[in-house]
Image (cartoon, rainbow, N blue to C red):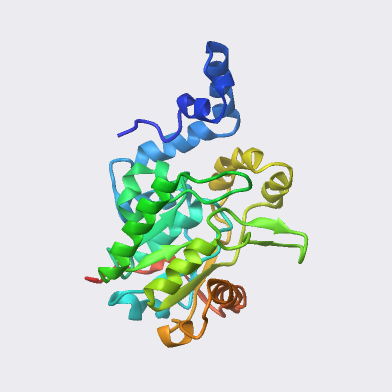
Amino acid sequence: MKEKLIDTTDFVLVSPIFASERGQRFAKLIMKVFKIDLVNALYDRSSHLTGAECARSMLKDLGVDYLIGNAERLAPLSEGVFITVSNHPYGGLDGIMLVDLMSLVRSDYKLMVNQILMKVKTMEENFISVKPRSGKNIPNPVTNINGIRETLAHIKGGHPFGFFPAGAVSMFRFKDFRVRDREWQESILKLIQTVKVPVVPIRFYDANLPFFYFLGLIDWKIRQFRLPYELFNKRERRTRLGIGNIISVEVLTKFTDAKSLGAYLHKVLYDMPMPKTFVARSKINVKEGSG
């Protein structure tokens, strides 16, 4: 297993300028300035654990005791197959939170993630990796085909699965002056439409600091350097999510194309009212279902 979550060799994959001795020194400086070394230390402290236990350990280390709205809606999920769809405002922490959340009722829950979260090798039993399309970036078709096949096999085997349909962290949208997901990936929506299983919307109500999204207006690569800082600034801050009502297969089959289905699910997710009450994650005992 890789000793560090991120090391200077990862910088070479981004740009060849980091391949030289001077470039490696510069990479080390960047890791310190942008708190990447603290991310490595966080990972190291929990790397003896795997799966949901590792997620729980990292959240505790970060001081993130997130709040759950409509927590009683988790109980019916202890059996059967279903899909969760969520917005993606944090760009990493939300994935860790989802794995921890679903461990309350299911040990067989998996989540589709991008290459950032796949670096957390100690949680790979809960992850299936794909690389979303971003701008002119063309994803590796082999990686994505294998990921989709693995996803289909997991769902058809009767196990729950989670999606961030946007495939990437949320962005500031001038249209409504709010932080919202970018356009949801058609490939994911088609997959949801194909498997015909109930869908559970899970909405994250909060977001990173505004400066994070401002950087995204300049360049998404610059914004990524801010992610470690955003990971460590959630201690004692409100980090709230809500569990939506189960959407039945009968409702889902009314939509004949992926675009209309996506518009419906997006509206359901973002129209979820703020729950009247929340319960802290630390107040709920883990009771895994058999699946």
Q: At x 29% / y 77%, what residue is drawn?
A: 80
Residue at (45% x, 63% y) in the render: 163
The answer to which image quadrant residue 170 occupies is: bottom right
- Residue projecting furthest to the top: 21
The relative height of residue 291 versus residue 62 in the rendered view (above or below) is below
Q: Is residue 59 above or below residue 82?
A: above
Q: Is 2 on the left or on the right of 200, as rendered?
A: left
* Relative vertical location of residue 159 with respect to residue 31 in this rendering, above or below: below
Judge left or right: residue 205 versus residue 141. right
Is residue 61 in sight in this rendering?
Answer: no
Image coordinates of residue 3 in percent, x first then y, are 35, 30
Locate residue 182 relative to residue 142 in the image: left or right: right
- Residue at 50% across, 50% down: 92
Q: Position of residue 273 (x, y in %)?
A: 60, 79
State the residue in front, 263 or 109: 263
Q: Indicate the quadrant where residue 181 lies.
A: bottom right
Indicate the position of residue 71 as horizontal and vertical percent values. Answer: 43, 76
Closest to the observer, 202 or 80: 80
| Residue 79 image-quadrant placement | bottom left
- Specify the quadrant that holds the C terminus: bottom left
> Quick one: 109 or 69, which is closer to the camera?
109
- Residue pushed farthest left? 290
* x and y percentages locating residue 262 in the rendered image: 56, 72
